[in-house]
Amino acid sequence: MRTAIYPGSFDPFTNGHLDVVQRAAKLFDRVIVAVAKNESKHPLFTLEERVELVSKSVSRIKNVRADSFDCLLVNYVKRCNARAVVRGLRAVSDFEFEFQLALMNRKLNGEFETIFMMPKDTYTFLSSRIVKEIARLGGNVHQFVPPPVRVALRRKLRETTD
């Protein structure tokens, strides 16, 4: 079984992320969307909430599941017996950082490949940070995130202002 890991903080999971997942699901037998525990980023959603939102957002894709990890990515990849790591590239500016990560991961564990995938052009401008900012300022994020995320964003931002 060819397994790929799609790691990220996914705070929140966007339609751009979903697009990359859908593309990866066509290429691999199994795709694990691995939500990273990274408290230094001060996420809006807890790790458990992010895993749940990813899980709900990908529920219709049979060969995709959500999970979390709090170790080196290379160790998680090995534990899952994965053959590839999928990374989304929105713009040329993403490439330099992602390329460095891919080379470091290869140095730490050369047994898997990093696959760079581009989302549809309609999502190249989209980022979790921008989505959170739009939502915080009362903007409509309907076209940017899956329905479960939209509901959770509304609820979470209402909680933080109460």
Image (cartoon, rainbow, N blue to C red):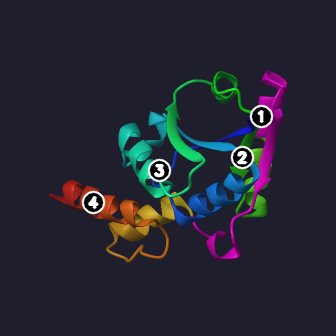
Tell me the element at label 4.
Answer: helix
Q: Is residue 13 visible?
A: yes
Residue picked out by circle 2: 86
Task: Answer with mark 2 or mark 3, whichever residue precedes in sequence.
Answer: 3
Crowding at dot 1, Cα within 10 Å, few <14 / some 14-19 / many 20+, comes out as: some
User: Mark 4: few, some, or many residues within 10 Å (few <14, many ≥20)?
Assistant: some
- Give the residue displayed 50% in from the left and 37% down from the top: 67
Q: Magenta segment: does it hold 116?
A: yes
For the point 41% across and 70% down, the residue is 134
User: Looking at numbered disc 3 in the image, what kind of residue is underneath it?
Assistant: Val
Specify which label sits upstream in the sequence, 4 or 2: 2
* Gap in angstroms between the C-alphas marked 1 and 2: 10 Å
Q: Which residues are magenta?
A: 101-126
The residue under label 4 is: 157
* Mark earlier in primary sequence (1, 3): 3
Indicate the position of residue 109 as horizontal and vertical percent values. Answer: 80, 23
- Name the secondary structure under disc 2: strand
Specify the quadrant of the image occupied by residue 150: bottom left
Disc on the earlier residue, 1 or 4:
1
Q: Which mark is residue 54?
A: 3
Label 4, label 3: how far apart the Cα atoms are = 18 Å
Amino acid marked by disc 4: Leu
Mark 1: amino acid: Arg
Left or right: residue 126 versus residue 50 is right
- Say which of marks 4 and 3 sits in front: 3
**Residue occupied by mark 1:** 83
* Badge 1 element: loop
